[in-house]
């Protein structure tokens, strides 16, 4: 009995000593961090201390609990050259942030391929945007709008195909702690009797497998209901982008002679012009908005503006992506370059395609516009569409004209009243 007691005491002493070493090592790490903050790429995965490896081991074992973790992450410069290993900083949530300069990327590699049914969640802080692309692709999938420290999650609805590698492009001042994909889980059991389940809401039981499904999953092509005013819009997937098929009609009518506001405290307080000051024209063709009102006072490309939650005012480049998606000539890249200098009529018959009203097309409505003197012009003949990219006193726009097969690309004064199409994040 004495021998057994002695062994227990020795084992207890060993445990206490190990705990003391771990605490001492933690203090040492904190002391080092206070004197020399960790920078992106400072530690490789092989250089991680043992306590980080333990945390990573348990994090990596979460795949059965609705998580697809990343297996690698690198910082890329503006030319997409790898400059740092970020996995030790963004591979798990531990308040060790990686600060990414504007114009740089994180290339995140997930442990499994994702599809448009998945989403990406990022724990981040700061102020700016993160655009998500497939690896080495220019086709924008979604945009995160970062405002303060929080979880941010976006569906990959606009993505075509599948991939495990994504390029996340940063603008503004953003710090990232964790990148992950939460996904529905499956639980395997040895029975198929659903009567043994107390509650089976959103659960399918078949062949011994219980599948936990998402409820009310919205996909592009479904009708969108704006929760702010209950107005509905049809949607269409063009390439990898999910667009509204109507011009947005949100806000309260103000006369064309008035200047609209610049903020959006509520849907009712957004101001809109209706052609000829007639609400019926807003019902059929959407509202007309000055750029500052459309953007709700923001000057950030990709801002939500007057769009519903989860949608945003398309950027200049996102309209270029749309044009390239419908271009069929042999000179698409020349006709529709990703730059902020090329203007005038572009393309061959892309304007005709974008004007065609169809459940599978952009269905560009020629709603006319509000002039800077408060009058209205050219309903049924011309449609102007704001982008979210400013150009000094102007902003970039696209224009479709009933008698012209091409697309007009230019900048115009922010005081005009033009149409707005919203794009899914």
Image (cartoon, rainbow, N blue to C red):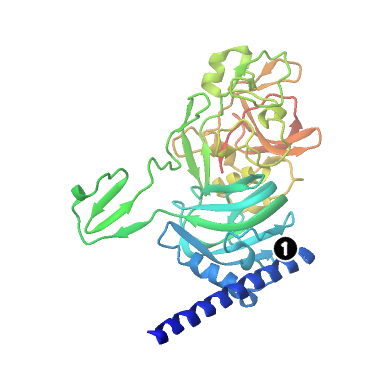
Closer-to-camera residue (271/74) = 74
Q: Answer above or below: position of 375 versus 224.
A: above
In-image side of 162 versus 47 (left or right): left
Residue 76 in picture, x, y percent from top left: 69, 64
Visible in this render: residue 245?
Answer: yes
Badge 1 local density, few (<14 within 10 Å), some, or many (20+)?
Answer: some
Residue 156 in picture, x, y percent from top left: 50, 50
Q: Answer above or below: position of 186 versus 297.
A: below
- Secondary element at tag 1: loop
Closer-to-camera residue (375/258) = 258
Closer-to-camera residue (417/362) = 417
Q: Quadrant of the N terminus?
A: bottom left
Residue for badge 1: 77
Q: How many marks?
A: 1
Residue 355 in picture, x, y percent from top left: 54, 33
In-image side of 234 versus 97 (left or right): left
The residue under the point 68% across, 52% down is 334
Quadrant of the rendered structure where residue 82 is? bottom right
Q: Answer above or below: position of 289 versus 299.
A: above
The residue under the point 65% across, 26% down is 264
- The residue furthest bottom is 3
- The residue furthest front is 2
Residue 268 in picture, x, y percent from top left: 59, 20
Closer-to-camera residue (297/245) = 297
Quadrant of the rendered structure where residue 218 is? top left
- The residue furthest right is 392
Visible in this render: residue 82?
Answer: no
Q: Quadrant of the C terminus?
A: top right
């Amino acid at each position: 009995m004495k021998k057994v007691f002695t062994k227990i005491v020795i084992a207890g002493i060993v445990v206490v000593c190990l705990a003391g070493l771990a605490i001492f090592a933690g203090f040492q790490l904190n002391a080092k961090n206070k004197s020399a903050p960790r920078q992106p790429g400072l530690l490789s995965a092989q250089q991680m201390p043992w306590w980080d490896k333990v945390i990573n081991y348990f994090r990596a074992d979460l795949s059965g609990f609705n998580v697809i973790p990343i297996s690698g992450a690198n910082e890329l410069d503006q030319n997409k050259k790898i400059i740092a290993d970020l996995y030790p900083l963004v591979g798990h949530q531990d308040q060790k942030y990686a600060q990414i300069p504007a114009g740089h990327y994180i290339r995140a590699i997930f442990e499994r391929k994702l599809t448009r049914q998945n989403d990406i969640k990022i724990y981040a802080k700061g102020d700016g945007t993160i655009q998500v692309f497939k690896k080495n692709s220019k086709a924008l999938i979604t945009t995160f709008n970062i405002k303060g420290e929080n979880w941010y999650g976006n569906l990959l609805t606009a993505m075509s195909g599948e991939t495990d590698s994504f390029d996340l492009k940063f603008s503004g001042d953003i710090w990232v702690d964790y990148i992950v994909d939460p996904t529905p889980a499956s639980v395997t059991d040895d029975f198929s009797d659903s009567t043994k389940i107390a509650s089976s809401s959103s659960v399918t039981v078949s062949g011994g497998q219980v599948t936990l499904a998402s409820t009310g999953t919205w996909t592009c092509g479904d009708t969108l209901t704006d929760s702010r005013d209950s107005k509905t819009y049809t949607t269409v997937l063009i390439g990898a982008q999910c667009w509204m098929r109507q011009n947005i009609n949100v806000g309260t009518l103000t006369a064309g002679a008035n200047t609209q506001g610049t903020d959006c405290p509520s849907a009712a307080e957004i101001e809109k012009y209706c052609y000829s000051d007639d609400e019926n024209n807003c019902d059929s063709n959407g509202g007309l908005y000055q750029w500052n009102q459309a953007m709700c006072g923001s000057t950030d490309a990709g801002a939500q503006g007057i769009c519903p939650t989860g949608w945003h005012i398309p950027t200049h480049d996102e309209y270029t992506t749309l044009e390239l998606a419908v271009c069929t000539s042999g000179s698409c890249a020349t006709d529709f370059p990703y730059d902020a200098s090329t203007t005038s009529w572009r393309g061959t018959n892309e304007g005709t395609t974008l004007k065609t009203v169809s459940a599978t097309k952009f269905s560009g409505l020629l709603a006319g516009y509000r002039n800077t003197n408060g009058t209205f012009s050219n309903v049924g003949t011309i449609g102007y569409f704001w982008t979210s990219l400013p150009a000094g006193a102007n902003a970039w726009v696209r224009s479709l004209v009933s008698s012209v097969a091409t697309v007009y690309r230019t900048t115009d004064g922010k005081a005009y009243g033009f149409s707005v199409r919203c794009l899914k994040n």
